[in-house]
Image (cartoon, rainbow, N blue to C red):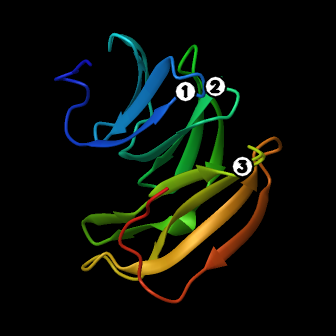
Amino acid sequence: LWTAEAAHDGWLRSLSPSPDGSRVATCGKDGFVRFWNATDGKRLLEADAKADVLSLRYAPDGKSVLAGDLFGLVREFDAASGKVLRTFEVKELYKYDRIQDVGGVKCLLLSGDGKTLFAAGGVPKNGATVQGLPTVVAFDLASGKRLSQYQGDSTVESCVT
């Protein structure tokens, strides 16, 4: 229906439609979250996440977007202004190893009732092979409180939501 040839400088990491389908949010290696009109592809807004953004999810009410980055932070951006509303920390998903950054919040998912945010990735074991223990951290979306953490016992390479 439409294209945006210069949507991001570098890789497009993720996209998320707004709950009403009128907008699309995208994120990329360039550290920006961008908001687009879903009908014609016009760029509406951009937010500077200041880091490689790996995952993205609109909040159930459509008023904000959650963006997970390389450094284990999930920022909630206001979808109307692009301002950061709050930050969730999942820093165990990030490791600096020599000259290499590895890990990050690879996936974001909201529970069916929209009350729980799940941030997932791998707790890096090393920097050379970027293997890690699959880890999911749950947060209460309303309060921002960390609820629980699950850590598996095998490696994780990718996540599909």
Secondary structure state at the residue bearing disc 1: loop
Among the two numbered marks 1 and 2 on one chain, the one whose residue lies closer to the N terminus: 1
What residue sits right under mark 2 in the picture? 62
Query: x, y (%) of residue 75?
Result: 57, 40
Q: Are marks 1 and 2 in contact (CB under 8 Å)?
A: yes
How crowded is the residue under tag 1: few (<14 C-alpha within 10 Å), some, or many (20+)?
A: many
Looking at the picture, tell me which residue is in the foreground, 61 or 64. 61
Secondary structure state at the residue bearing disc 2: loop
What residue sits right under mark 3 in the picture? 112
Horizontal arrangement in the rendering, residue 117 relative to residue 94 (left or right): right
- The residue located at (23%, 42%) in the rendering is 11
> What quarter of the picture does the N terminus occupy?
top left
Query: x, y (%) of residue 154?
Result: 46, 87
- The residue located at (22%, 21%) in the rendering is 4
Residue placed furthest toward the left? 5
Reply above or below: 55 against 130: above
In space, the residues marked 1 and 2 are separated at their CA atoms by 6 Å
The residue type indicated by label 2 comes to Gly
Q: In which quarter of the image is residue 38?
A: top left
What residue sits right under mark 1 in the picture? 18
- The residue located at (56%, 83%) in the rendering is 152
Reply above or below: 139 against 18: below
In space, the residues marked 1 and 3 are separated at their CA atoms by 15 Å
